[in-house]
Image (cartoon, helix red, strand yellow):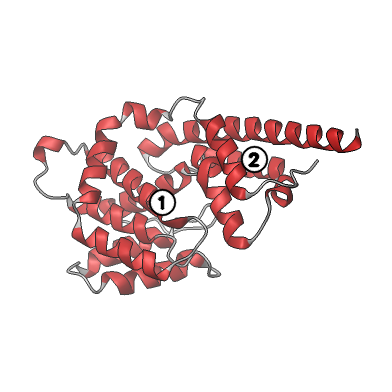
Amino acid sequence: MTVDGYTCEEARTIARRIASQFEAPRFYREQREACALSRDLFDRNDTVRSCMNILAETCSYGHGLLHAEKVAIDAGAIVIVEEQVRPAAVDSPPRLVSLAHLAGVLHDIERSSDDHARRGALTAATILGRFTLSPDDINAVAGAIRNHEAFQSFELPEDHAARLLSDALYDADKFRWGPDNFTDMIWDILADRGISPAAMMKHFLPGLKGIEAIRDTFRSRTGTIYGPDFIDRGIEIGMALYRELSLKAYQRESDLRA
């Protein structure tokens, strides 16, 4: 069964319609305050804004700027939850939240390269060297980026803050394997690589198995609480999308035979 005739944008529209029928992930409902605070701190951080501009000028990887922004804000929110940061106590961005935002923005800057996590860590360290960050902070961000790939060995930082930063980046990136995978991420990647939805459908169900395997890999306390919910919702949306695209393909083939 194929879905010939659908562009990535048409398939994305169908996926977003399906996703809109599902409730938002628990993280965004139960940790609304942390997410809003992270968003506010992200928007007010000049260094983060500069790094977003650098990313926009230098990168054309499949996930896109929206992916980087979402990962950054969710990584910051995870840190806020873990460290129990409260809005009333915030006059300027807490150091670790700022580092989480920077790690999120830059984590896929070498996405199109082989061994992109390691190379991305090196590139991020070079970029961050232009700003007024300490060597320890730059190393913590670079280490988090180096550790963000799924199903790969990674180094556990001994320092609590560096480990939380690494775990928060990983978890926020893997939150994207939920609904975002079907509303945005997969279509950005396919379009960037010139792959049609029809070609993707041949690998759709095995791909869902790969997504399911992420459920048990979340690293922070917050990630282990909320991460599986992202994955479960993503799989539900993915199955509904597969059924609808398959039905449309069947109907189209039936019309052609008539």
Residue that sits furthest to the right in the current view: 257
Q: Quadrant of residue 31?
A: top left
Residue that mark 2 sits on: 208
Looking at the image, residue 202 lies above or below residue 255:
below
Dot label at residue 66: 1
In front here: 199 or 236?
199
Determine contact: label 2, label 1, CB under 8 Å.
Answer: no
Crowding at dot 1, Cα within 10 Å, few <14 / some 14-19 / many 20+, comes out as few
Check disc 2 and give the amino acid type: Leu
Quadrant in the rendering for residue 189: bottom right
Q: Nearer the viewer, mark 2 or mark 1?
A: 1
Whether residue 47 is visible here, answered yes or no, is yes
Left or right, 216 with respect to 67, comes to right
The answer to whether one can see residue 159 in this image is no
Q: Earlier in the sequence, mark 2 or mark 1?
A: 1
User: Quick one: SS at disc 2?
Assistant: helix
Task: Name the spot of residue 58 as percent of width and height, x first.
Answer: 40, 70
- Could you tell me residue 128's position as x and y percent? 27, 69
194 vs 203, nearest the viewer: 194
For image coordinates 25% across by 73% down, the residue present is 129
Query: Does residue 55 appear to the left or right of 180 in the view shown?
Result: left
- Residue at 43%, 30% in the rendered image: 25
Residue 214, horizontal then vertical, whole percent = 55, 42
Position of residue 113 relative to residue 257, above or below, is below
Closer to the camera in the image, 190 or 236 = 190
